[in-house]
Amino acid sequence: MSTKTFKRWVERKNNEICFSIVQKYYIGKELGTEVLYRFPLLILFIKRLFFVLLNLSRSKQIDFRAYARSKSFKEFLKRLLGLYKFQRKDLLPGTQELVPFNFEAQPATLVSIIIAVHDHLDCTYNCLLSILNHTSTVTYEIILINDNSTDATAAFVARCNNIIYIENDENLGFLRSCNKAAKLAKGEYLCFLNNDTQVTASWLANMVEVFKQDPLTGLVGAKLLYPYGLLQEAGGLINHSGEPANFGRFQNPQSHMFNSLRECDYCSGACIVVKKRDFEALEGFDVQFSPAYYEDTDLAFSMRYRLNKKVYYQPLAEVIPFEGISSGKVTTTGNVTAYQSQNSYK
């Protein structure tokens, strides 16, 4: 075996082991269990350690800076396990100085990007900054609707240019806020985008392109990726009893299964694009699902069965949601997430 071939083999096996570790760790975390010190990871850890030592023995100069940045033994262990190996390198930091935005005034608007926010200004800031950095070939407007936030969102937006700002006097919830903002939209298309997301290069242009390729397109959803690099959703599935599932969750986003434009049952409302006239024809999101959850599923099915249009998953539009920041991830009384079970029955 040549040196290059051996090196590629080591890299491939190391990636496979790291992927298994990351997958098991975050699935366990999703279920609320601490798996870092559990036996299933022990064998993988031994294999990972073998390849780390193998790389050390073959390298003349080792960069220990990544390990030195560890703030605790637990973080050091995570780095050694490879839990950060697939983490997105293009993510904006969680906290940074909030410099006002200067969005350019555009003579025409193709897409109205609607962002409903309730607190979490730091997330909203990074969402807006990612739009500014990665949306250049599509004319757009930003409509930010503040759903009765208690933080400094209003004061910050007042210092920005060319953001259409709406402030609710009372908390209307995600669904009603989006319907309210959509009425003011000037674009041919509406893009509903969660404020706890970050977009990537050409995301919006690639979503709009689907409508141009197929005139029967009704809704287009993005490829959703976890910040640590695994796939969150490649389109949604609905089973025979109406229960939804994120296709490809915790899988490898580079797999060919998740990288083709295709029709799907629905797409999560974290980032979807529809034509404004179609949204108006359906009278917006159905208010029976207020304040949130399943309105995106219902919209996709309404596009298909009321307007005879198609629902597409677009893998070329990559969006990173920071899941659970706005509404939480555990279904509990008093939490917006509690509406999952109620709206599932509806």
Image: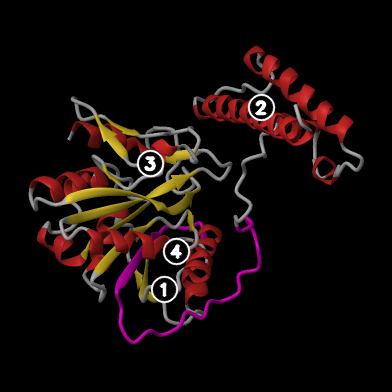
In the rendered structure, which disc, 1 or 4, sits on the residue that comes first in sequence?
1
Tell me residue 305's x, y (percent).
9, 45
Say if residue 148 shows up in the picture: no
Neighbourhood count class around disc 2 (C-alpha, 10 Å): few under 14, some 14–19, many 20 upward: some
In the rendered structure, which disc, 2 or 3, sits on the residue that comes first in sequence?
2
> Which numbered disc covers residue 151?
none
Q: Residue at x 78, y 24 (%)?
A: 49
**How many circles with numbers are drawn on the protein?**
4
CA distance for labels 2 and 1: 39 Å
Dot 2 falls on a residue whose secondary structure is helix
Q: Which residue is mark 4?
A: 202
In the rendered structure, which disc, 4 or 2, sits on the residue that comes first in sequence?
2
Q: Which residue is mark 3?
A: 234
Q: Residue at x 53, y 67 (%)?
A: 129
Mark 3 touching mark 1, by CB under 8 A?
A: no
Q: Is residue 264 left or right of residue 323?
A: left
168 w.r.t. 27: above or below: below
33 w.r.t. 215: above or below: above
CA distance for labels 4 and 3: 17 Å
CA distance for labels 1 and 4: 8 Å
Image quarter for residue 258? Answer: top left
Q: Nearer the viewer, mark 4 or mark 2?
A: 2
Neighbourhood count class around disc 1 (C-alpha, 10 Å): few under 14, some 14–19, many 20 upward: few
Q: Which residue is mark 2?
A: 13
